[in-house]
Amino acid sequence: MSGKAVKINFKKKLNRDDGWAWLMLAPNVIGFLMFMLVPMAATFVLSFMQYDMLTPARFVGSDNYKTLIHDPIVWEVTWNTIVYTILTVPIGLCLSLLLAVALDNIRHFKRFFRGAYFLPSITSMVVVAIVWQWIYNPEYGIFNWVLSWFGIPAQKWLTSSATSLLSLAIVGIWKKLGYDMIIFLGGLQGISTSYYEAAQLDGASKVQIFLRITVPLLRPTIMFAFIMAMISSFQVFDQVSLMTKGGPGRSSSVLVHYLYQNAFQYFKMGYACAIAYLLFAIVLILTAINMRQEKRMREIY
Amino acid sequence: MSSKVKKIIFNSLLYFILILGAITMLVPFLWMLSSSFKSLTEVFQYPPKLFGEKLIWENYTQISSRFDYFAYFMNSIKVSVWVVVTQVFTSATAGYVFAKLNFKGRDRIFLMYLATMMVPFHVTVITNFLQMSMYGLVNTLWSLMLPASVSAFGTFMMRQFFITVPNELVESAKIDGCNPFTTFIRICLPLAKPTIATLSIFCFMNTWNDYFTPLVYLNDSRKYTLPLGLAAMKGLYSTNWPVLMAASCIAVLPVLIAFLLAQDVFVKGVMMSGMKE
């Protein structure tokens, strides 16, 4: 027998710790089962039922999903969610990438800038909503005031169905900018400085370096941030509930907002569960795209 | 144009962009702070002024006389402390088991944890609510504390750390007569302090700021946590902006202090959440 085999055998004997393992895992696994796996399955089952918390649940087959497809509000809120995503994700990521590269290239006040940009990310959305509602105030707010410097006429922002979703998107971008910036900073730190030095020796301009070196090498991070941003913007709820309540009309209502209303205001639990699984399906598709991209990326590099 | 001049122009451009951005980030906070010291008439001035004529501290003293602010604050503290302590404990022990102990089905179970990390919170919240109402825990702080005691992300994060601990260390502890639990407590846990700090701060921030979960579970205003109490205040007294701004300033304080003390820990946490292995 080779020495290696003896070692493995010895290791196996040394590592028989099923008992301890399960004992130490128990609190976590019990919680995981109770609050994660079982509810996930229960939501799925409930999505085939009708339940209002007063009368017993009744099996209705795929009725909830059929209603879902024919419910114009579902289409409207899904469309609003997509519009919100289109408004926030590309602009937010471009800005945060730009800021991350700028921050990576300066020498002074790095900590100050990093802190300033991250501040909205650590602030409760409730506080953010209070302040921004005041900023957006059509009569007294500073947003219209600042825009008036550039000759832009006053808007009603949150209280007009034409601008409500846009107003929420601006808050969303503002709040998440620092978070994405730090993710990009992490990615930038992973790029070896030798690439930049070589490019500089070859006489490449700053813009060329950014487009030809930074962006391609940062692609895995950009892709990851992009998918994560999409997933989180599909789950947007807090600012909607706090600043517009989905209004005026349904102009700023999103998927999770409609889910919340169905579950906890109309008490259509089964229907809400069906909406939850619609959301789940969307997130799953996005995750699958992310994993495929990653695989492709690994094949390239 | 010489390369030196070019460099100076480029650098000033960078600073210009960064300063412009920083102003956009900070002005809302300055606005909040300055408005919290203004009088009711000053707030409604147009065009707006950053500073009022004198500091009106009454806005701050009025908070507690009008709202159960202290109770909200204590509820938030209670929930946050519980969640941080239990989540760090369950995550660290399970993370250690997944990284260093050998037993049947280990990787399969861990894969299940990983798979649930992408599941939207809203998929489980409805049935968790029904479960809590079954136990009679809706409208108590337990409904916020119990489900948050376990986190797949926390477990993942701790496991990623423990995997970097050399096996020789664990094996030599075993030979010295430690069982897996004492090895964990005495040898490996002390090494994990930085990761535990990161997880704790993240967990604290998320729990402290959480609005959705309390909104679902609580309807008795005495049980409200700070974000929910603040939101209720916003609905009731949306005309008294100075007091509302003062209450907001106080609500931001705990996380702000933690952030100023440990900016690097926050930043490390975000970077870790952005780097998946």
Image (cartoon, grey):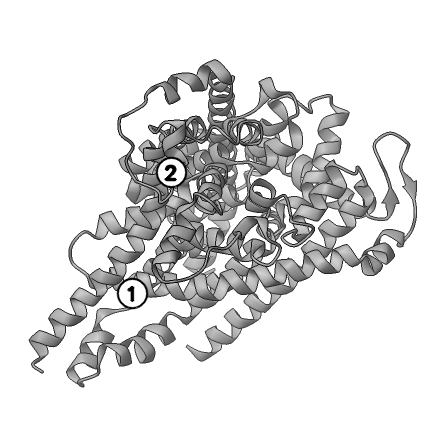
What chain does badge 1 belong to? A
Dot 1 alpha-carbon crowd within 10 angstroms: few under 14, some 14 to 19, many 20 or more: some
> For the point 60% across and 42% down, which residue is it?
A241
| Residue with the mark numbered 2 | B45
Q: Does any portion of residue A221 appear in the rendered image? A: no
Element type where label 2 sits in the image? loop
| Residue with the mark numbered 1 | A101
Q: Find out whether the residues at labels 2 and 1 contact each other: C-beta distance under 8 Å.
A: no
- Foreground label between 2 and 1: 2
Element type where label 1 sits in the image? helix
Dot 2 alpha-carbon crowd within 10 angstroms: few under 14, some 14 to 19, many 20 or more: few
Q: Quadrant of the C terminus of chain B?
A: bottom left
> For the point 47% across and 40% down, which residue is it?
B96
What chain does badge 2 belong to? B
A138 or B104, nearer to the observer: A138
In the rendered structure, the answer to whether residue A275 lies left or right of residue A136 reads: right
In the rendered structure, the answer to whether residue A136 lies left or right of residue B47 reads: right
